[in-house]
Amino acid sequence: MASDPIAPLRVNHHKQFELRDHSTDATLGWHKESAARELGRVKLRLDVLQQRLFAEKQRSVVLVLQAMDAAGKDGTIRNMLSGLNPAGFRVSSFGVPGGPEAQHDYLWRVHAEVPAKGLIGIFNRSHYEDVLVVRVKNFAPRAVWSKRYEHIRGFEQLLADEGTTVVKCFLNVSKDEQRKRLQERVDDPEKRWKFRLGDLDDRKLWAKYQQAYQEAIGRTSTAAAPWYVVPADRNWVRNLAVAKILLHHLEKLDPKMPPPEDGIDGLVVE
Ligand code: ADP
């Protein structure tokens, strides 16, 4: 591949990871107007590769989206999928575990959502909540959650070994941008449904969440399942970056159309 424009966002697992070194409002040298055209081109290519992945039916991809509230997980998914074939994607959202989810280990519900061969899964939150909210809010003791980084590395390696590429994006929004967006949710009747008072409790725990993200990302970014820290204060940068990250990994997979059945070559349909 000629160049890898999203390389600066990838968390290098050989280096000590510092979340504070990552900008929330970088433009990555892109310009808003040309970025819209570029996103169009990226989408066209995503469409081609998604179709090949589907036709090949040998491998699958999971794109994990994690973020603080209002960083734009929903907007990213909406933007990413518009214009693409919905049949090739599966979106899974993970909320507070309830019912049978709460009766099993934390990876149970996640494994069940891993897309079948040929599909691209988008995880709106994920197993990472079990080392984020669970840690920050003491839903489990340290002795329990501290073992999970290793489980997660093993789980994602298993998926990689069995044909599922896992790619993880942290949408990195600043505390001030989050304040503006939460205020907008309060003020705009069309957005108010998204606002929960509990969002303010999480906001008060901002520093603890940043610490938990820092450790989660630092300890689980691997060659098999890398993390990307995506600047998320500007929606257009965030959308283009995530689309490019997915495209990069699909290009690496290089899915191929399956060979035709014997006897099809040169066949004339009457
Ligand atoms: P979102 O905020 O992603 O748009 P919701 O408003 O439904 O969606 O919030 C989902 C909530 O579920 C979040 O507060 C998240 O922290 C919580 N959650 C997800 N996974 C877990 C988990 N394993 N344990 C506890 N809470 C979780």
Image: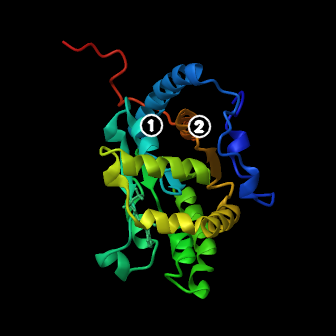
Q: Nearer the viewer, residue 184 or 221?
A: 184
Residue depicted at 41% across the width and 33% down the height: 51
**What quarter of the picture does the C terminus occupy?**
top left
Q: What residue is disc 1 on?
A: 80
Residue 240: image x %, image y %? 55, 33
Residue 67: image x %, image y %? 53, 55
Residue lying at the far front of the rendered structure: 187
Residue depicted at 56% across the width and 72% down the height: 131
Q: Is the residue marked by circle 1 packed among few (<14), some (14-19), or many (20+) residues within 10 Å?
A: some
State which tag comes first along the sequence, 1 or 2.
Answer: 1
Q: Nearer the viewer, residue 85 or 241?
A: 241
Quadrant of picture, ligand 1: bottom left
**Identity of the amino acid at label 2?**
Ala
Q: How many marks?
A: 2
Q: What residue is disc 2 on?
A: 241
Residue depicted at 53% across the width and 19% down the height: 37
| Residue 270 appears in the rendering | yes
Q: CA distance from mark 1 to mark 2?
A: 10 Å
Element assignment for label 2: helix
Residue 187 placement, left or right of 253 = left
Residue depicted at 61% across the width and 80% down the height: 147
